[in-house]
Each structure stands twice: as structure tokens, then as C-alpha cells.
Image (spheres, rainbow, N blue to C red):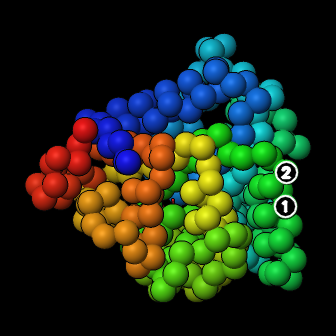
Amino acid sequence: MLKIIKAKDYADLSRKAANIIAAQVILKPDSVLGLATGSSPIGLYKELIKGYEAGDLDFSKVRTVNLDEYRGLTPDNDQSYAYFMNENLFKHINIDKANTNLPDGTEPDAEKECARYDAVLESMGGIDIQLLGIGLNGHIGFNEPAAAFTKGTNCVDLKASTIEANSRFFATIDDVPKQAYTMGIGSIMKSKKVLLVANGEGKAEIIYKACCGPITPEVPASILQLHPDAVVVADEAALKVLMEKCPEALN
Ligand code: F6R
């Protein structure tokens, strides 16, 4: 069952979500954290950095696995997710870079890279907490709406709407990669705990569908309704439609 936590605004959401991850790291210093990129978790990462600087959080034994990476981008490309993680979190905390993992966007052989990343996930012995954002179309990781839920790591063709949404980070829309490697929904569902963060009114309709609508691969995030320990932390703007149409979901 989904637990939905209402935050006042983005700052409040970031603190609440960071506290959940901080508790995980304090309780289990060698936790495996599943991490996400995008704009939603940036505030949360800032809070974790503050926690480290204050001496409350120690990441020296933490291992991480990221959800996804654009296919074709090198880690030093400033639009790659490897670069994002370094800039927004890793370089500011005492994590051992050897303990951080992302799909390798430079591997041209998709089958090989998906198998390699699945083996990495397997070797971790389970993700303790997987952080997620949600796409406007309900995607998690880069698992786009489809006829079936994905299982393992896969190479996806990004939907036009996702390319459009992500173009804000690139000089022109033609620069946005058209494919990405992403952890599969099966692997996300195997995580012991899932934490999805969403903010802003633009996410209100999809948050309502994901939390209260039918469980369907057309809305990939809707499968989280079946996860035994999934938490959504969203601000009031992102919960606007849900609060109108299914207030009982706010427990
Ligand atoms: C990023 C990822 C994506 C984003 C989603 C929302 O690693 O997996 O699913 O979480 O596209 O992006 P933002 O947070 O930018 O709205």
C-alpha cells in the first residue's frame, strides 16, 4: 500500500524525503541506495550534503545504483547522469566513487550493457531504498508507458514527450539523446523500500493516476501501489488533483 506524505512546498518535501534516506543511512551505514536524477531530487540531495557537513551522515560504507543513463553520453558530458550525480551529490560527500554505479552510456552493445547492469544489481544483494521521480507520463526510471511492465535493465527509445520535457537541459531539442539505459520495473519493485518525490502542479494529474488509478503499464508508476513499502512525498501542488478526487488516499 502506498503511503502518501503531504509536504507544504519543495523545501519541505526535500527535507522530509532527505530525512527518510538519512534514517536509512544511520540505521544501516552500508546501505544500498538506489538514486535518481532530474530536478525533483536536487533539494533532497542538498539536504543530505548538509547532513554530511553537520557530521550527522557518513557515506563511507554506502553503495549506490542509479536508475538510468542516456545512451551515447560520456560521464564527462555535463548532461550525462553520471555528471549530474557527481555535481549534485557525490563530490560533496564522503562516498567512495568506486561504490557508485550507473549504466554505462558509452557501451554501444545494449544487450551486453543491460546484462552487466543486472549483474551489478544482483551483486548488491538488494536495494535498501530506491529513490524515484515521476515523468509527466508516469514513467519511472526511463520505463515509458508500454504494453507490459519491464523486468530487468533495458535500452529504451524515449517518447517524444520525454525528449521534449528533457530538452530544457540541452541547447537544442536535437541534442537530447533519443535512447537511454534504465533499470527495469521488476528491479525497482524488488527494492526493499521505494521513495517517490514529486513537486509542482504539473505533476498533479499523473500523481493522482499513479496513486489512485488502475495499475497499468500505461502508467508505469501505478505498479508502486503493489509495493509492500512505498512512500510518496509530494508537495501540495503535486497533490492537488489527488486531494480533490481521492482524498482518502492521504493516510
Ligand atoms: C531520472 C529518472 C526520471 C525522472 C523523471 C522526472 O533518473 O529516472 O524518471 O525522475 O523524468 O524528472 P524531473 O524530476 O526532472 O521532473
The answer to whether 38 appears left or right of 201 in the picture is right
Percent x, y of residue 1: 38, 48
What residue type is disc 1 on?
Ala
Q: How many marks?
A: 2
Q: Nearer the viewer, residue 199 or 183?
A: 183
Residue 220 placement, left or right of 150: left
* Residue 40's disc number: none
Front-most of residues 82 and 63: 63
Assign a secondary structure to mark 2: helix
Query: At which x and y percent is residue 127?
Result: 68, 46
What residue would you read off at disc 2? 123
- Residue 104 sits above or below residue 39 on the image: below
Residue 115 lies, with reference to residue 249, above or below; the image says below
Q: Do the residues bearing badges 1 and 2 touch, measured as CB atoms within 8 Å?
A: yes
**Residue that appears at 80% across and 27% down:** 60
* Image point (80%, 81%), residue name: 110
Note whether residue 112 is visible.
yes
Q: Which residue is mark 1?
A: 119
Q: CA distance from mark 1 to mark 2?
A: 6 Å
Amino acid bearing label 2:
Ser
